[in-house]
Amino acid sequence: NLGDGSEEQVSGAAVLAQALKAQDVQYMFGIVGIPVTEIAVAAQQLGIRYVGMRNEQAACYAASAVGYLTGRPGVCLVVSGPGLVHALGGMANANMNCWPLIVIGGSSERGQETMGAFQEFPQVEACRLYSKFSVRPSSIEAIPSVIEKAVRSSIYGRPGACYIDIPADFVNLQVNVNSIKYVECCMPPPVSMAETSAVQMAASVIRNAKQPLLIIGKGAAYAHAEEGIRKLVEQCKLPFLPTPMGKGVLPDNHPNCVAAARSRALQFADVIVLFGARLNWILHFGLPPRYQPDVKFIQIDICAEELGNNVRPAVTLLGDINAVTKQLLEQFDKAPWQYPPGSKWWNTLREKMKSNEAASKELASKKSLPMNYYTVFYHVQEQLPKDCMVVSEGANTMDIGRTVLQNYLPRHRLDAGTFGTMGVGLGFAIAAAIVAKDRNPGQRVICVEGDSAFGFSGMEVETICRYNLPIVLLVVNNNGIYQGFDTDSWKEMLKFGDATAMAPPMCLLPNAHYEQVMTAFGGNGYFVQTPGELQESLRKSLADRTKPSLINIMIEPQSMRKAQDFHWLTRSNM
Ligand code: ADP
Ligand code: MG
């Protein structure tokens, strides 16, 4: 040893942690065990925040939410075999949502392939379907460049999930410190702009629209395009409609927001501009009868392959939404134009909004017990802080909740998303609360769960209590999936046989005291049956900034949404 450190050794785990740090990775969620415990410890020592979760799926949801909220990928760290398999749900969800994410999986030792090694599984292959990039570094020396490529791939182009496989024997293998070259942090994604002629054409199509509509998707939220889109909306006086997670890019109470007339707006618009929203099931594929057969779509997206999916667009604007919106604004600055506020289209939309809002207010004002969804959400909305993060999942809970719970700020809503994934709520809420702690102290996270949705990741309440994250969990409890039985019907049913033979597949145990999951770990739990109890417990929960709370809200087990114009709207996305 020459005393200059040239003989100094470093472990694979330490190299991996340092490589993540060099790429500005700040958050890691996971569950430790053989062979990744040392990786979590090394990451934590370097100041990467490590959050230990109770199920890999929830850990992966949490890491992906960090990516969406911060624009830099979070890491999900899992053990080999089953650990990695459990994380696939989170990877799929992130990739479908176009959110950046890095999954790091320990894997069985090199040299034991096909021998039936401990938790042996073809992990790199398995992850390929769920990711943009899936690879095992060929050596410890290769780790820094592979990490850089994974982080870069997760945020460049259409964002998505990346997988890195770390064989067990890498973790504790020692290599000479001088053999490792760390790679400089990758540059932020380069900003691409649309072709000028296409921008001019788009502006002209908008100018000639009789019944225009802007649709704001979560791509616009991710792109931080709020300022430009607001200018465009206000300058040109255009109606806009947010998608579920596009909510808040412009505030829901903006006078140009036509969310309350969603079906009408989609059905009769003649020109629709898509700001980072795909024409998938959420937007009914852009096809009749939900749209006019000759509606002109102007598609703005960063992913060229997306352009032209399901419909032939009138204009495609390939580029970053923020940059492209500015390009459009330039056109309207050069030759100012406004959509006439007194038009028939605006009147139609406003009328429909009024009648829809009146219908849900009427349901909300019903005094009968158990409460219905609308009553619950109206009371919740009254108390929610304007800057709170709203996490939501469930079937009716999410769909009806979305129409009543308002978002005023971009990237303040997380839900089941493109993949319609149930079980995301607690992981998302934990991620949001941790990010808020660092970047927006004092911000509250409200997690509105159906009773079924809560069950998927219910044990993460322990994680919430362990880290003392003051999340307010609302479980809107109808004793089932879509609907359930009341206690009497359940008892009646048991007269004919036991539950394994008789219970309808949708039913969950009636009157379950989910609030006790929270009190079991020291948080506040409330069981509420009336509007008054709901108001009181929510007031107390929001006032307590030192502890998490769970409010178990009993509602009418057969409570459904209000009548819809389209009979096939009874499920999912209105
Ligand atoms: P929503 O569910 O809100 O309709 P989607 O997830 O379907 O939204 O669509 C989001 C779209 O935004 C994706 O097609 C994605 O490629 C695109 N996107 C993501 N980031 C950007 C960006 N910076 N600029 C342009 N498009 C983007
Ligand atoms: Mg339910």
Image (tube, rainbow, N blue to C red):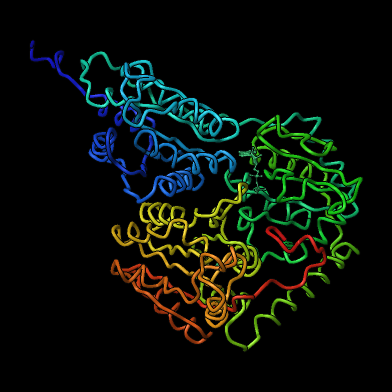
Q: Nearer the viewer, residue 555 or 302?
A: 555
- The quarter of the picture where the C terminus appears is bottom right
Residue 29 % position (x, y): 37, 44
Q: Residue at x 75, y 77 (%)?
A: 359
The picture quadrant for ligand 2 comes to bottom right
Q: Nearer the viewer, residue 571 or 485?
A: 485
Residue 43 in sight in this render: no
Residue 314 in sight in this render: yes
Q: Nearer the viewer, residue 331 or 506?
A: 506
Q: Measured along the vertical axis of the image, is residue 419 above or below residue 309?
A: below
Residue 42 % position (x, y): 24, 35
* Quadrant assignment, res 394: bottom right
* Quadrant assignment, res 315: top right
* Quadrant assignment, res 393: bottom right
Q: Residue at x 72, y 45 (%)?
A: 280
Residue 208 % position (x, y): 90, 47
- The quarter of the picture where the N terminus appears is top left
Question: In the visual, does 154 lie left or right of 463?
Answer: right
Q: Nearer the viewer, residue 130 or 133?
A: 130
Question: In the visual, does 332 lie left or right of 31?
Answer: right
Total number of numbered discs in the rendering? 0
Q: Measured along the vertical axis of the image, is residue 95 above or below residue 405?
A: above
Residue 373 % position (x, y): 61, 74
